[in-house]
Amino acid sequence: MKTRYSKIKSTGMLLESQSSGDEHDPQYLQTLMDNAVSSGFDKDDVEVGWEEQEVIEGWIQEQNEALKTYADRRKESYPPATDYLDGIV
């Protein structure tokens, strides 16, 4: 079963996804477009459609990775300082 989504064309940022709806009824996609426009996004820069849930989850994971700071990435690469201090003692 496919999931409907909305995202920004210029940045690829996912705005919203919803799992219910009929792929053959355009009103379901219009709801997502209306939500995006009412949130202040330009209608011409919003993409709405249907996609497999796994693909959307991949987009979310990529988006979360892109938001990580240098410090976040370093923190994932090394154990906590408390482990180091416990090892010394």
Image: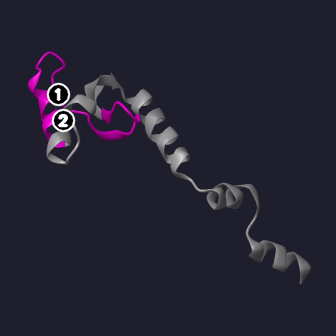
Tell me which amino acid carries mark 2. Answer: Leu
Q: What residue is drawn where x is 22% and y is 37%?
A: 42
From the image, tell me which residue sits under label 2.
Answer: 32
Residues under numbered marks 1 and 2 in contact, where contact means CB atoms less than 8 Å apart: yes
Q: Quadrant of the C terminus?
A: bottom right
- Mark 1 nearby-residue class (10 Å; few <14, some 14–19, many ≥20): many
Q: What residue is drawn where x is 33% and y is 35%?
A: 8
Q: Magenta stretch containing residue 60, yes or no?
A: no
**Location of residue 57 in the rendering, given as x and y in whole percent from the top left corner:** 43, 36
Q: Quadrant of the N terminus?
A: top left
- 81 to the left or right of 16: right
Q: CA distance from mark 1 to mark 2?
A: 5 Å
Q: What residue is drawn where x is 76% and y is 60%?
A: 78
Q: Quadrant of residue 23?
A: top left
Q: Which mark is residue 29?
A: 1
- From the viewer's perspective, is residue 54 above or below residue 80? above
Q: Magenta stretch containing residue 18, yes or no?
A: yes
Q: What residue is drawn where x is 48% and y is 33%?
A: 58
Q: Where does the magenta region start and end?
A: 7-35
Tell me which amino acid carries mark 1. Answer: Leu
- 46 to the left or right of 54: left
